[in-house]
Amino acid sequence: MDFEESEFEQMIRSSVREIAEDYDEDYWREVTDERRFPEEFWQDLADNGWVGITIPEEYGGQGLGMQEMVTVMEEIGRAGAWSATAGFILTPIFGGETLVAHGTEEQKERWLPQIADGSARWALGVTEPNAGLNTRNIETRARKEGDEYVINGRKMWISGVAEADRITMLARTLSPEEAEHPSHGLSVFLVDPEDSNLDYDEIPLDGFFPEPTYNLYLDDVRVHESQLVGEEHQGLYHVFDTLNTERIAGAATAIATGHYALEKAVEYAKERAVFDAPIGSHQAIQHPLADAYADLETARLMNHRAAWLYDNDEEAGTAANIANLKCGEAAWNACETAMTTFGGMSISKEMGISKMWEMIRHLRIAPVSEQMLRNYIAEHELGLPRSY
């Protein structure tokens, strides 16, 4: 195994770092305080080809893989743009990867170039009040009428809707009684969030997450059959197809944020002097920082392995779930250590550490909980009985 980064990977890092250096801490402080999407930074990334990195070249992308996407996400996070990494999960993954795998040619030609050039944004409409991680409990119904589907139902915890051009929406096209089995009878649609029969309201958050999240109310939303993604009634499997990439991208977000929090803590530990010595000279500060770094690097290697497996058409499910689990834990430990290192200054806006801490804690819960990650590993790798 060759662990040396290729010249191409080094080029990716230097190019992304060069873009990120144009956006200072004041810019990111403003973005996070206003809870707005970093439009200017995102467009710069898109203009240089990094938003469409996994989109095939014939649709305006770079035609590269998850390994390269992970490299981009890591570098923008470590350059201080950690809050922007979550945007890759919504648009390039739930928009781009879903359409690459299951979209019609018409859908690909319309939307993939717009995702790649930064002009289109995406949201994922899956979670419902009675269907969180148990996706098969979805109640939102899409009824076929002629060449249209009429969708009725409610979604919640749907991030980025207000800025999205389309929502990848999962709805039931067969009742549970009509379906052949619990995972059958669900379909994926491209839904316009500006449809007059779709309403949404923002969920107030008591804590930081870079994307505002919403309740959605669908009352006779009509979608032409050309907006069906993939096969009718097989939508749950289509959504599952993107889960490995979502796990890998989520892990990269965690690592990027954890590394930035750690770097800020190390800088502070070198500069902050108490009792005539930098606090970083004391083992009570040094050792937790060293442990945090070791954990981040270990988890990061697992995520690169998961990305390599995915890109090489190998089974990546277990690796992706392990990576997501361990990257979340490592990033949380790094943010906790940074909070301790900064002490009371950790909650100041100037430092921004508490926002990283809050975001990583959220990522350990959603879009998938650590308990479900462990369930997957136990069942699929250890052969233990299904526990849910």
Image: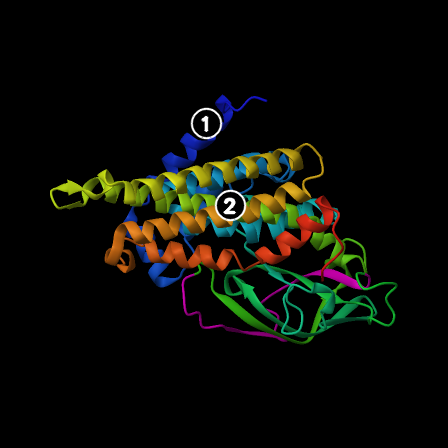
Could you say where residue 286 lies in the image, as x and y percent from the top left?
30, 40
State the image quarter where residue 233 is shown. bottom right
Q: Residues within 10 Å of mark 1 (few under 14, many from 20)?
A: few
**In the rendered view of the protein, which quadrant contains the C terminus?**
bottom right
Mark 1, mark 2: which one is toward the viewer? 2
Could you say where residue 363 lies in the image, as x and y percent from the top left?
50, 56
Name the residue that disc number 1 marks: 11
Magenta span includes 377 = no
Q: Is residue 242 visible?
A: no
Tag 2: amino acid = Cys
- Point out the residue furthest to the bottom here: 219
Tag 1: amino acid = Met
Residue at horizontal 44%, vertical 44%?
Answer: 256
Q: Is residue 213 left or right of residue 270?
A: right
Residue at horizontal 32%, vertical 53%?
Answer: 339
- Compare residues 146 and 289 and report the one nearer the observer: 289
Q: Secondary structure at mark 1?
A: helix
**In the rendered view of the protein, which quadrant contains the N terminus?**
top right
Name the residue that disc number 2 marks: 327
Q: How is the image coloured?
A: rainbow
| N-terminal-most mark, 1 or 2 | 1
Q: Secondary structure at mark 2?
A: helix
Residue at horizontal 63%, vertical 74%?
Answer: 129
- Compare residues 104 and 377 and report the one nearer the observer: 377
Residue at horizontal 66%, vertical 37%?
Answer: 310
Residue bounds of the magenta highlight? 184-208
Mark 1 in CB contact with mark 2 (< 8 angstroms): no
